[in-house]
Image: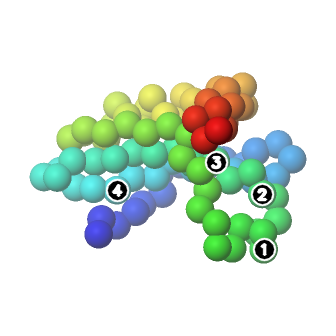
Amino acid sequence: MAERSSLYTRPLPGGGYVEIDQTGDPVAGFCVRLRVERRADPQRRAGHQAPVIATAEGTEPGAAVAELREIAASNVSVAQRIQRWQTGRG
């Protein structure tokens, strides 16, 4: 199993956070993911994975991280991605 490394985190207004993480390696390729944890209370986070609202894959993670960081830095973009994620679940 590939090791996960956190590349970027920022708090959300009202609690929770967004995080960009990466798994993979140069040979197999990288997967860069944008996760959003909406639960403000850390105790409520136990046993739950934060939903992945955007992903990018490839052999060079730099461009993917930049793309996802642009989304992660904007509360509006994060909210839009959460809506897409919720729609996809229903």
Q: Give the residue type that dot 1 points to.
A: Gln
Q: Position of residue 82 (x, y in %)?
A: 66, 36
Q: Give the residue type that dot 2 points to.
A: Arg
Reading the chain from its start, which is encountered first: label 3 or label 4? 4
Q: CA distance from mark 2 to mark 3?
A: 9 Å
Which numbered circle lies on residue 23?
A: 4
According to the picture, the residue beneath numbered tag 3 turns out to be 36
Q: CA distance from mark 2 to mark 1?
A: 9 Å
According to the picture, the residue beneath numbered tag 2 turns out to be 39
Relative to residue 52, is residue 44 drawn left or right? right
Q: Give the residue type that dot 4 points to.
A: Thr
According to the picture, the residue beneath numbered tag 1 turns out to be 43
Relative to residue 87, is residue 64 drawn left or right? left
Figure check: 4 above or below 43: above
Judge by depth and name the residue closer to the eye, 88 or 56: 88
Q: Is residue 42 visible?
A: yes
Q: Are marks 3 and 1 in contact (CB under 8 Å)?
A: no
Judge by depth and name the residue closer to the eye, 61 or 37: 37
Q: Image quadrant for the N terminus?
A: bottom left
Q: Identify the residue at horizontal 46%, vertical 46% (top origin).
A: 33
- Secondary element type, mark 3: strand
Reading the chain from its start, which is encountered first: label 2 or label 4? 4
